[in-house]
Every structure is written in structure tokens, then in C-alpha cells.
Image: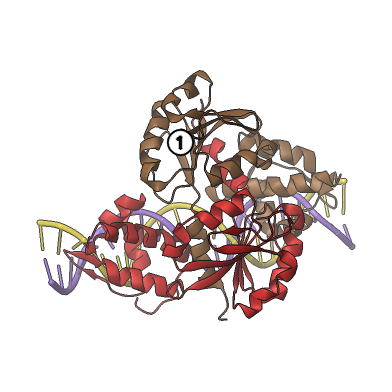
Chain colours: A brown, B red, C purple, D yellow
DNA sequence: CTATGTGAATTTATTCACAGCA
DNA sequence: TGCTGTGAATAAATTCACATAG
């Protein structure tokens, strides 16, 4: 099954695998078995083997998979093998947390611009990035930024998304609790923290 | 199909439906059709109707579904019909954002305690909540808090999760980029922002 | 003897299409 | 006529079980 379309669910899991592999390779492990990886991630080995089977052989039976090779291959599939110049829109508490979070760089995301509407914030510098006025959003095109993180209140989210689309952004990570209507060619992934929290009680044992 | 186990995927979607319904009822709409709701949320009507069919009749053919009734029913299923006393562990940038975010209350989550290890933060008050030392985590039991939001660096996440389990927490919303090993009876939902961002480039059109 | 890779079997979810009700 | 609710049809994902390779 070497030549096969990778299912969407597999794509969803690849970043998790990548995380586990990087964690493991930090420990200077050269090879890893599906069992070990499953343990680290809290999944099962079959799933991992099946997922990997969609894009080629890595494993040596009896030994495991070459960690570095796997990392490279998965990064390539996810297009994380090139640096993605990213803009942050909305430098509130959440925006700040995102701006200061070191974990993005690991996966090739470089936040190079930050925007806000608040005059008190505009002009300030955080992590070597000057916060600029959102009216200057068209700078994104010049700066070759095609990815944006949207961390603003719901009320203005759709409007700002429209602006981002206009200046040529191809992907948006949206933290506003709402659906964003965008052209088909633009991909939006929404993280709605309250929604994830809202799933918890259902699964919690009666207390 | 009135008496039927609700599939997991449906449970995952219920909070989204709830969000849409609340949004819609804010507009003083009494009834809503699966088509309208699908438009708001960016899904399709069949899915919604199918999902709703697992737990009873709401709709009036030709008219739509009673918004209020639906909200009540979904809230009940997700156990969001009671207030959940919640603790925040880790008051960094992300923790602050969470603490100040008003959206949790809508779904019945009341953040009543906050903890940190940083001596400079302990004792400070934010939103009427005094930040306490994590060594006092056992207070959770006394305060009848069974739900925790964990917003701390990965290095200490597992250790803190162990503590939380010890003091009787039944659910954890985990923002650390790692799997948490917990007893089966405890439910963990992990939000790994970098992981979600890492899925974006794959879906972005070649730029 | 251990761990991979994958067809086949099973389970689960999505989509369709339409009967039936207001 | 418009919209619901749901069996049936389709599609997809997960799990199993085992042949195979080091």
C-alpha cells in the first residue's frame, strides 16, 4: 500500500506523532518502535503502524523505525519543512501568550509581525516585534506572510478575516468562537477553548 | 430511533451546536431550521438532523426546532446544566487569558480558584480570585472543585496532573504539549495550539 | 523471537432520499 | 409546500491477525 491517499484522520494525527518523535529524539534515541511511540502518546501501536503505512517503509522488523527519517518525512508531508512566516492579529492576553510561546518555532512557524487596533499597544515592542496598526494589514503581502493567527473578540473576527483574505493569506488559525466564512482556497482551523472545555463534563464520572 | 446511544462524534459536535443556538437565540429567534443552523456553523443540515435524532424530537416540520428546548436538552446531555466549579493551575500569559475570558460562564464554568508556583504571583488578585501556592492544591477537595485547567510548561505538567488526580479532580483541560497519564476515571482533553497550527500548511494551497 | 506492514474483517460515521407531518 | 426524522446505502476508519523480514 505504498501509493495511497493519506486519510484526513491520519493527517490530523501526524503532528502528534511528530511531537512524540521530537520528544523521543531529544532523548538521543535513534530508533523507536510503534509500541514505544504509542506509550509516549497514549495511543495504540496498530494505529501508528497503519498510519505510517500510507507513506512508506521506515521500520526494521525487530528494531523499530528510524526516528530522524520519520521526522523528516512527516515534516515534508505536513509542509513543515520550510519556514512559515506568520502574522499575529490581536495582541491581548491570548495574543501575548502566543507571541511568547517558544513551541511554534520547533515546527517551522516564525511569527514576524503583530497587529492590533488598540492605540495603547501599537508601537510597543515584544520579542523584537513592533505591534502595528491593523490598518496596515496590507503589509503582509509585501512581507510574504501567508499565514495568520487571529486572536481577537468574536465581534470583529469575520471582518478581520475578510481583510486577511484580501491581502492574500492562505491559512488562518482562528481563536474566536465562531465560524469564519472564507473562500474555499483559504483554510481556517478554529480553536474554541470553551468548546473543548464544554466536552469535559460529559466524560467525567459522576462526582 | 428515539432510544439510542449517542455516538462520540456527535458528542463532539454538540458544543458547537450549542454555541450556534445561543448565538441565534441572542437574536431573539424562537425557532431555527437545520438549514439555518448549518449556515451559521458552516456544516450541513443532514448531519445536524441526524445528530439531533439520537436524542428526540424537537422540530416541527415546516417550521424548525424550538431553540430554547434544544439548548436545554443539549446542555443536559453535556452536563452543562449545573455550574462546574473550576480551578486554574498556572497563571502565566495563557492562564491570564483564560482567567479573563468571559466565555466560560456561558457554558456553566465558574473559575473559583487559581494556583501558581511563582512567588511573585502568589497573593495577587485577579478578577476577585487570589492566586494561591500550588502546595495548597488539596484545598480543591474542600472547595468541591472537580475540574481543572492546566496551563503550565510541559516539564511540570505530569507532576501537577498527578497532584490534581490525588485531590479528586475528575477532568483536566490540558494546555501542555504532551500526553498526561491519568487513571481511567479521570478525563483529560488536551489543547495543543502548536499541533493545530501544524495542520494548517498541509491544507494551504501552494503559495 | 521481536516488530513491521498490510489485506481483510469489523465497527463506525456520513450521506442520501424520502415518507410524513404542520 | 417546507422542513423534520430516520431507515437504508454508502463511505470511511479502526482493529485484528498474520505473513514476513531482521
Residue sitting at 70 percent across and 47 percent down? A19
x and y, in percent, of residue B30 in the image: 22, 64
Which of the 4 quarters of the picture holds residue A66? Answer: top right
Residue sitting at 46 percent across and 33 percent down? A119
How busy is the neighbourhood of tag 1: few (under 14 within 10 Å), some, or many (20 plus)? Answer: some
Is B153 positioned to the left or the right of A99 in the image? Answer: right
Q: Nearer the viewer, residue B207 or B19?
A: B19
Give the total of numbered labels.
1
Is B193 positioned to the left or the right of A102 in the image? Answer: left
Relative height, residue B66 to residue B168 (above, below) = above
Residue B123 in view: yes
Residue A184 in view: no
x and y, in percent, of residue A125 in the image: 60, 30
Q: Nearer the viewer, residue A44 or B29?
A: B29
- Work out which quarter of the rendered image holds the N terminus of chain B and state it: bottom left
In this view, the residue farthest toward the top is: A142
Q: Nearer the viewer, residue B47 or A167?
A: A167
x and y, in percent, of residue A187 in the image: 46, 38
Is A189 positioned to the left or the right of B64 in the image? Answer: right
Residue sitting at 60 percent across and 29 percent down? A129
Which of the 4 quarters of the picture holds residue B119? Answer: bottom right
Which of the 4 quarters of the picture holds residue A43? Answer: bottom right
Q: Nearer the viewer, residue A139 or C13?
A: A139
Relative height, residue A173 to residue B151 (above, below) = above
SS under mark 1: loop
**To which residue does mark 1 refer?**
A118
x and y, in percent, of residue A155 in the image: 36, 45
Label 1 resides on the chain identified as: A
Amino acid at each position: 500500500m505504498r501509493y495511497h491517499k493519506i486519510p484526513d484522520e491520519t493527517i490530523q494525527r501526524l503532528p502528534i506523532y511528530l511531537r512524540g518523535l521530537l520528544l523521543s529524539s531529544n532523548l538521543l534515541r535513534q530508533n523507536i518502535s510503534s509500541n514505544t511511540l504509542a506509550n509516549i502518546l497514549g495511543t495504540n501501536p496498530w494505529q501508528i503502524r497503519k498510519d505510517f503505512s500510507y507513506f512508506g517503509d521506515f521500520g526494521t522488523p525487530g528494531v523499530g523505525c528510524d526516528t530522524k527519517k520519520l521526522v523528516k518525512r512527516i515534516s515534508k508531508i505536513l509542509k513543515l519543512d520550510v519556514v512559515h512566516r506568520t502574522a499575529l492579529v490581536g495582541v491581548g492576553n491570548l495574543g501575548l501568550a502566543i507571541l511568547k510561546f517558544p513551541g511554534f518555532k520547533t515546527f517551522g512557524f516564525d511569527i514576524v509581525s503583530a497587529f492590533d487596533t488598540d492605540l495603547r499597544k501599537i508601537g510597543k515592542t515584544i520579542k523584537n516585534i513592533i505591534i502595528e496598526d491593523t490598518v496596515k494589514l496590507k503589509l503582509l503581502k509585501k512581507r510574504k506572510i501567508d499565514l495568520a493567527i487571529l486572536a481577537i473578540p468574536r465581534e470583529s473576527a469575520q471582518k478581520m478575516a475578510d481583510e486577511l483574505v484580501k491581502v492574500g493569506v492562505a491559512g488562518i488559525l482562528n481563536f474566536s468562537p465562531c465560524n469564519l466564512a472564507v473562500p474555499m482556497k483559504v483554510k481556517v482551523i478554529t480553536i474554541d477553548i470553551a468548546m473543548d472545555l464544554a466536552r469535559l463534563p460529559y466524560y467525567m464520572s459522576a462526582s
